[in-house]
Structure formats: structure tokens, C-alpha cells
Image (spheres, rainbow, N blue to C red):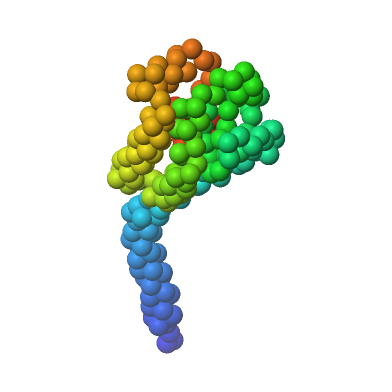
């Protein structure tokens, strides 16, 4: 009797083992890629541009709001022609200030005759010198270049220069000591708002406005 030897399917077993080995290699090779993606560094350029855009948006909103508030005062209140200038009579108690071709004064202050020649000459110098346009320009630049310290120094220098010009005009008709007394009395004895008109592009840093 002849015994038949068992037949081993070597080729099929080898093929299965090869597929398993390939799958293991592919699985292990995918792990480093995932770890590399997980360790990807933060995009600092994107973050910085995001911060710049956010701050610029805040400055832009404030810039537009300030202009809107001033034009709202112009449109809501009574206008009076006085010595060739347009006065806007405000219902609130406020020191005089100017914006574009308008001089803003408290209605009670004007009607009671407290608007002195020197104060009017001061504000008229701002209007005639178109100082509000300088303020608008520098504030507009600050919307975009808010990070530039030189612009803040320039803004302060421009405002001080405006005041020197306006004070010089007032001093042509008023003695120095009397003029100083008028301005100090206004600052000390009158109740006014919390904010500076010049921050709203007005032309008198002692005037009080509507902005921040």
C-alpha cells in the first residue's frame, strides 16, 4: 500500500503572510505623519494680522462714531450767525469748541453774553485756520497706523500748535493776564462734560465734547 504524502500549500501561505506584513508596514508608516501634523507650529503671522485687524476695526468704529456724534450735534441744535461765523447753541453746559466751520457754545452761555471777544477770537482762529482738517488727517492715519508712536507725538504737537495760533489771535485783542484769567475761570468754575472735544477732532483742547 502506497501512502500519499500531505501536500503543503506553500505559495498561498506565503502570499497571506506577505499581505499582513505589507499592512503592518503601512500602519506603522502612517503614525509618524500623524505626529508630525500634531506638532505643526502656530501660525504667528496669521495671529498678528488678526490682532492688527481687530484693533484697526476698533479705531475705525471710534473714528466714524466721533464724526457722527459731532454732525449729530450740528443737525440737532440751533444755528446762529455771529460776526461772520456759524454758532451751534448746545443745550448742555459746555466750554466753547470748534469743528470745521462751526463754533459750539452753550446756549445759556451765549445768550447771557458770556462769550467774550477773546474766546470768540480763539475759536474763530481755529475755524479760519481749518484746524479740524489737520485733526481729521492725523486721526485717520491713526486708524491704520495705530501702532506708530510717532503719530501720537505728531498729534500732540499739532494740537499744541493749533492752540498757540488761536491764543495768539486772542491776545491781539486781550491783555495776557486778563486772557489767562478768563480761561482759568472757565476751566474751574463751569460744569462740563467728561471728554475732550479735541479727541473728537474739535480744535480746542480745553473744549468739551461728545466722544469717548
The total of numbered circles placed on residues is 0
Residue extending farthest bottom: 2
* Closer to us: 149 or 92: 92
Residue extending farthest top: 189
Relative to 150, residue 186 above or below: above
Tell me the residue at 66%/34% (across/down): 80
Residue 39 shown left or right of residue 205 in the figure: left
Residue extending farthest front: 173
Tell me the residue at 49%/12% (across/down): 189
How far across and down, in percent of the image, does residue 125 sit?
45, 39
How far across and down, in percent of the image, does residue 47 sit?
40, 50
Tell me the residue at 35%/19% (across/down): 177
* Quadrant location, the N terminus: bottom left
Can residue 123 be seen in the rendering of this structure?
A: yes
Tell me the residue at 61%/34% (across/down): 82
How far across and down, in percent of the image, does residue 160 sit?
35, 36
Residue 27 shown left or right of residue 59 in the figure: left
* Closer to us: 142 or 97: 97
* Closer to us: 174 or 119: 174
* Closer to us: 73 or 186: 186
**Res 12 → quadrant:** bottom left
Can residue 73 be seen in the rendering of this structure?
A: no
**Res 204 → quadrant:** top left
How far across and down, in percent of the image, does residue 61 sit?
54, 44
Relative to 205, residue 157 above or below: below
**Res 94 → quadrant:** top right
Amino acid at each position: 500500500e502506497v501512502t500519499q504524502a500531505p501536500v503543503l500549500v506553500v505559495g498561498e501561505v506565503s502570499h497571506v503572510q506577505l499581505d499582513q506584513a505589507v499592512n503592518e508596514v503601512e500602519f506603522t508608516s502612517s503614525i509618524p505623519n500623524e505626529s508630525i501634523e500634531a506638532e505643526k507650529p502656530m501660525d504667528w503671522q496669521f495671529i498678528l494680522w488678526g490682532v492688527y485687524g481687530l484693533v484697526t476695526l476698533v479705531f475705525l468704529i471710534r473714528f466714524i462714531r466721533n464724526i457722527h456724534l459731532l454732525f449729530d450735534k450740528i443737525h440737532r441744535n440751533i444755528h446762529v450767525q455771529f460776526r461772520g461765523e456759524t454758532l451751534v447753541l448746545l443745550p448742555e453746559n459746555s466750554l466753547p469748541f470748534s469743528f470745521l466751520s462751526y463754533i459750539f457754545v452753550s446756549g445759556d452761555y451765549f445768550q447771557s453774553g458770556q462769550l467774550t471777544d477773546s474766546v470768540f477770537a480763539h475759536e474763530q482762529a481755529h475755524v479760519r485756520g481749518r484746524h479740524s482738517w489737520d485733526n481729521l488727517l492725523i486721526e485717520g492715519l491713526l486708524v491704520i497706523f495705530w501702532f506708530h508712536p510717532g503719530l501720537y507725538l505728531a498729534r500732540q504737537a499739532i494740537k499744541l500748535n493749533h492752540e498757540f495760533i488761536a491764543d495768539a489771535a486772542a491776545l491781539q485783542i486781550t491783555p495776557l493776564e486778563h486772557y489767562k484769567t478768563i480761561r482759568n475761570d472757565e476751566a474751574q468754575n463751569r460744569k462740563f462734560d467728561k471728554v475732550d472735544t479735541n479727541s473728537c477732532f474739535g480744535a480746542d483742547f480745553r473744549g468739551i465734547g461728545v466722544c469717548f
